[in-house]
Image (cartoon, coloured by chain):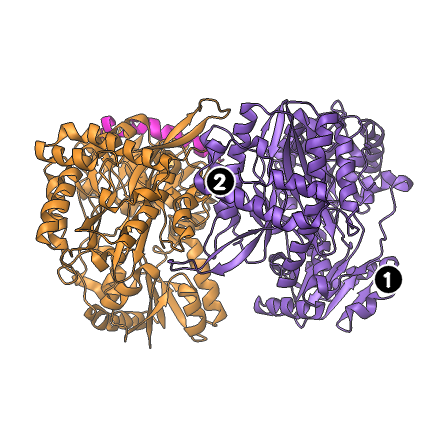
Chain colours: A purple, B orange
């Protein structure tokens, strides 16, 4: 099995490792050290070798930071991880603080002492984040100092896992839809239009897209850790550990791309004197900016030039996404039949649920990886938004409760991400009503048509208005971008309360996942992926409108739908979706699953 | 009558005045000069003495700019004014350019010649705007130079109207709800919290609010042109033309406020050496920033500290707004009865419509001013969003068409702004359908409940989704803030597609005005004002939710409602609104109007 139910840290991590970090700090003359979750590549998922925050504290969430002073320490997490941090971290050693309200800067400002020197690893912080830290430390009379080597790495020493060296595979045009030369020339032209001579690209997903390669350096995303320098003429230098270079790779990359080991990057940056180099301050760390400025290059700050082209999938990628979702839909149909019949009868455990779903996906023969660890939250575990089942925490299914399953798969032709909430036995009226409010929001965001220029921020409220009217809400975004056999969370678009100026463009894939969580009781989330459709005229209208095509094909539990709460339009929309699920998935599954699908996809 | 139907400029203005401006430019050694619409106070409405753009070009729109080079010139307007500018301006003299796409900076960059010196009046440009101009000119090899005096003012000479000197009146606590001392201490504390010693406030509406005074220096808004320096301790220096100071004013302002003539302001700024002074770069011109920096003050850039307190009306102001809308509602009921009976039968002119409405408002005995010139757009004139009837342009009402009337009043207790669209004779099915789509959006935005922190940008789409689904949209914002016997357009909140990070707060008044415009045919807009209500629990819910209370009380033309397109919820909402209009306004009007109201407010 790919997913494990083990815990990789304990609260003893902090007790054992903080003293080692403090000793290394002292050796470098530091009074404090800042430990972000991010690594050199600012990825969501880290290789074990770079999960410094987990090693230092025990905390394994996907966002956070710690500060170790010589006499005390603090860990910073957001509201999603308020419970998990107390479970994983020794809070006698690490005071728990909010990552968002005040965060690390406020802690530095109030707790650092005048005259202190606080270290940071310049490869791990974006320039903007660093500026906030520097200004906060200055208010306390303390100084920030870039340090090399990272004292935590020194403390970790021989126990630190090796850097990953997974072989880099080619990603053929039948999946990418555009060869790398064309991509590089297209992005290169955009550099020239911005007056830049070159771009430094440090996000592995961007390099994966640009060079049509995939790697295996982190779990759940087929990323090759790498950096690249792209010139406006489309030629490029790709910095990649030689151990990862497979024999076919150089020919695949072609003449326009030179492959170089990572230790040549610093020298390459030093060569850029006088050139205008585009760098993204949200994905590239301060170290790169400093190296370029030291070299006499003119740094142009701007968004990663591959981000928008990568986000807008081409017709081949969209067709691949459709295929991946049909394949995933067959596994989901089998799984959901099993959950609502056998598992609901046996009242099995969350761990069985996870294993069974992985088995159905594995049986497709096309599974490359999960796109993230499956969340199977029974009863009150469903209300913990970032829950991941472990041997210690897993619950058995409970009759009269709900099971929330959020999962996804990596296939060569596409990445999936789907959440279904299933009633285990008869649900309460409250569960049905709240599920239906979530469903109304989900349907509104699925059917909306909108003009060019509309952002995800402008559409977010559509998914919340029915909940708001009932005095309810959910505390996460409504939708994230999704890669094409790449990260399951991908920008720059987003459907969220947070302001976002990126217009939704045809070919962008986003999730639509409103929810409702009753702490200590149950969780509800309904998530489909949907792709933005091109502007099309509407009969009787004047302006072409974009819209969404739903990719995910899996039945929504009718036992949880309070039909009387739906408008005629909503009911027709749900029935049409179910009819489509049956028509597409029915012919591809065994008779037993098909029979079940016919029942659960019948008009309500 | 307050409103006139005359035109104050002609296209000859440019022919006559551009040569005078060029001569004054030459005398100051300038090759070009930039003329923004804004004056020293960055107001929407200008005194005649400051309407430099109109004098230079003939263009009287509320936004725009011109550039006069020694050999050519251009005028810049946004899409709303694309037709009007060609009607008012000699386009042989002034090339018409888009104000938003490229705007003045692009023109400077492409058209200025290397070595040229381009003048600007530093009192008329915000620092941000100036930076864009400077950078664009530099790319052309040209230099910007601040000039004093303004060469346009020199050219205008004796023909320029005098600066207004309307007496400044007190605005008593029965309307303001909070005395000036309390306001100044409250805002002063917020300065201290931001680490500022003082704030320079240059927006007349802010000073009107802060000192509880009203003036008459511009039409349609009771503004006293003025500047103020507010200290963190709540004391203030108010710079006001002595000619405007009425005998009771000094006592009204009290001990904490010194009244000084405007020519003392420069000296007062020079006194601020070493102090931290908050200035709003969006409402204060570059001249203030330069003066403070020259004086050795530390400029803190931040929003006008009175903007948020002013936008969130207190209970007395809200009660005043309710009273103002009841009063306005009686005038509107009489007017709408007249329109849909007598005017529709006579097929009278737009000018009569405007006059009649003003007469009904005047008859309340409480009208201080219109809050803007009434827009009465018959048939195709209704499709021109910024239309204002003039003798030359006014149409007669047409049977089978629509009349759009957007109007408002200034009363001591509140400012109103309302749009109704009325069918003149039987409307077409298309008119009814499109009106009903607009109505659906209007109703959605009126009934929405939302959590604290929600911005107007997040709610904007609710008013558009029904139109979008039909392939339609409207090209203006959905809602603007409204002052309390102050400007009818007031920030910082806004309901708009444009990103806006200001959360809607209890007591904020906003308009709800979706529309639809069929060029050459008719215009539809439905506008009510609504006040944000405090967070209140919802039965069965978990989180208190804010919402809106509709202030405007005037029937919506039932002849235009396609009942079959409304959901049961929408129908109930419209019927309840009409029942409220009848219950509140009915008892306050004559029997004939009441009888008519009973008909048009009956359940649909």
**Chain under label 1?**
A
Residue at mark 1 to residue at mark 2: CA–CA distance:
53 Å
Do dots 1 and 2 share one subunit? yes
Mark sitting earlier along the chain (1/2): 1
Relative depth, front residue between A556 and B298: A556
Query: Which residue: 12% across, 55% down?
Result: B349
Which stretch did the figure color magenta? B172-194
Residue B213: x, y in percent?
A: 24, 35
Q: Residue furthest bottom?
A: B71
Residue to which mark 2 is pinned? A571
Relative depth, front residue between B451 and A587: A587
Q: Residues within 10 Å of mark 2 (few under 14, many from 20)?
A: some
Q: Answer whether residue B394 is visible to the viewer in this image.
A: yes
Left or right: B244 with respect to A537?
A: left
Residue to which mark 1 is pinned? A246
Note whether B284 is above or below B587 in the view shown.
below
Query: Which residue: 68% across, 68% down?
Result: A184
Query: Which residue: 35% across, 62% down?
Result: B147
Judged from the image, the secondary structure of the residue bearing numbered disc 2 is helix
Residue B158: x, y in percent?
A: 17, 62
Q: Within the image, what quadrant is residue A84 found in?
A: top right
Left or right: B391 with respect to B284?
A: left
């Amino acid at each position: 099995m790919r997913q494990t139910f083990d815990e990789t840290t304990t609260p003893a991590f902090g007790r054992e490792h903080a003293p080692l970090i403090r000793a290394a700090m002292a050796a470098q003359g530091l009074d404090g050290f800042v430990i972000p979750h991010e690594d050199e590549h600012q990825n969501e998922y880290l290789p074990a070798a770079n999960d410094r925050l987990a090693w230092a504290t025990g905390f394994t969430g996907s966002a956070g930071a710690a500060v170790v002073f010589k006499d005390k320490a603090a860990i910073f997490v957001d509201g999603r991880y308020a419970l998990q941090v107390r479970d994983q971290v020794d809070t006698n050693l690490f005071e728990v603080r909010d990552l968002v309200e005040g965060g690390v800067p406020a802690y530095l400002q109030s707790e650092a002492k005048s005259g202190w020197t606080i270290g940071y690893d310049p490869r791990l912080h974006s320039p903007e984040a660093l500026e906030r830290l520097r200004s906060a430390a200055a208010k306390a009379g303390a100084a920030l100092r870039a340090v090399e080597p990272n004292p935590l790495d020194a403390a970790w020493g021989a126990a630190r896992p090796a850097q990953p060296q997974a072989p880099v595979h080619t990603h053929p045009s039948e999946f990418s839809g555009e060869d790398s030369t064309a991509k590089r020339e297209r992005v290169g032209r955009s550099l020239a239009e911005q007056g830049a001579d070159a771009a430094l690209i440090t996000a592995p997903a961007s390099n994966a897209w640009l060079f049509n390669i995939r790697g295996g350096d982190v779990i759940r995303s087929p990323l090759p850790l790498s950096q690249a320098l792209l010139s406006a003429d489309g030629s490029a230098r790709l910095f990649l550990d030689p151990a990862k270079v497979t024999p076919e790779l150089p020919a695949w990359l072609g003449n326009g791309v030179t492959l170089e080991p990572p230790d040549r990057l610093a020298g390459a940056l030093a060569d850029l004197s006088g050139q205008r180099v585009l760098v993204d301050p949200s994905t590239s760390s301060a170290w790169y900016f400093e190296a370029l400025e030291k070299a006499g290059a003119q740094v142009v700050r701007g968004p990663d030039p591959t981000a928008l082209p990568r986000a807008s999938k081409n017709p081949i990628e969209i067709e691949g996404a459709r295929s991946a979702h049909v394949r995933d839909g067959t596994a989901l149909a089998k799984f959901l039949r099993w959950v609502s019949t056998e598992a609901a009868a046996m009242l099995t455990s969350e761990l069985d649920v996870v294993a069974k779903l992985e088995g159905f996906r594995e049986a497709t023969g096309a599974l490359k990886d999960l796109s993230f660890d499956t969340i199977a939250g029974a009863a009150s575990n469903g209300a913990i938004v970032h829950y991941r089942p472990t041997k210690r925490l897993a619950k058995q299914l409970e009759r009269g409760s709900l099971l929330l399953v959020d999962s996804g798969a990596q296939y060569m032709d596409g990445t999936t991400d789907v959440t279904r909430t299933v009633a285990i036995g008869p649900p309460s009226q409250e569960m049905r009503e709240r599920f239906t409010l979530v469903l109304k929001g989900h349907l509104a965001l699925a059917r909306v048509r909108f003009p060019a220029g509309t952002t995800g921020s402008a559409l977010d409220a559509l998914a919340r208005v029915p909940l708001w009217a009932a005095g309810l809400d959910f505390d996460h975004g409504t939708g994230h971008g999704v890669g094409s056999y790449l990260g399951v969370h991908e920008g720059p678009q987003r459907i969220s309360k947070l302001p976002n100026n990126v217009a939704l463009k045809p070919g962008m894939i986003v999730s639509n996942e409103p929810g409702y969580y009753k702490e200590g009781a149950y969780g509800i989330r309904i998530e489909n992926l949907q792709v933005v459709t091109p502007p099309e005229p509407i009969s009787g209208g004047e302006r072409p409108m974009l819209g969404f095509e739903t990719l995910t094909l899996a039945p929504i539990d009718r036992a949880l739908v309070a039909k009387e709460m739906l408008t005629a339009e909503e009911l027709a929309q749900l029935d049409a979706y179910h009819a489509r699920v049956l028509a597409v998935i029915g012919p591809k599954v065994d008779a037993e699953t098909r029979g079940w699908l016919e029942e659960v996809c019948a008009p309500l």
